[in-house]
Image: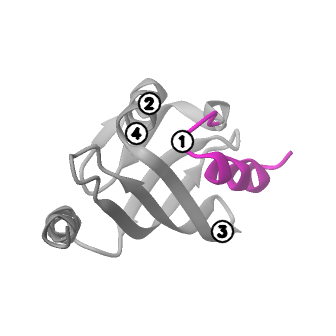
Amino acid sequence: MDIIQILKEDYQRFPANQTYSIYAEDVYFQDPLNKFRGVKLYKLMIKFIETFFLNPKMDLHDIQQEGDTIKTQWTLNWNTPLPWKPHISIPGWSELRLNSDSLIISHIDYWNCSRLDVLKQHLFSLKSR
């Protein structure tokens, strides 16, 4: 199975049962909240999402590969475990870079909204109750 197909399936079942074998051991990960190196820390971050977010879902809108770069467009949705359980939606995209062994060596996520916008989603949900 090729890496594009694996990624499509991982997005469909996110955050459960992700295919960590497609990542290099020293993969670099970055998003607007985190920056670290290593597949072990990446697994911990996914486990955190799986454990503490309610109804997490990653909708994949597009995936393209050009050479050693894979670009995805997605929307991450979940409910935060606060008493009013606000629905949070973050649209964004990822740039994944492959090494010579076709393993993901870099995974950088970008959001189409600011961190403040995400905070506002938590507060707006409170006001609408």
Q: Quadrant of residue 48?
A: top left
Q: Residue at x 57, y 46 (%)?
A: 14
Label 4: state its secondary structure. helix
Q: Residues within 10 Å of mark 2 (few under 14, many from 20)?
A: some
Q: Residue at x 70, y 44 (%)?
A: 102
Q: Which residue is mark 4?
A: 49
Q: Which of the two discs, 1 and 3, labels the residue nearer the N terminus?
A: 1
Q: Which stretch is magenta? A: 1-18
Amino acid carrying label 2: it is Lys
State the separation of the CA atoms marked 3 and 4: 22 Å
Q: Are marks 2 and 1 in contact (CB under 8 Å)?
A: yes
Amino acid carrying label 4: it is Ile
Q: Which residue is mark 1?
A: 15
Amino acid carrying label 1: it is Pro
Look at the picture and state if 53 lies above or below 111. above
Q: Which residue is mark 2?
A: 47
Q: How is the image coloured?
A: one colour
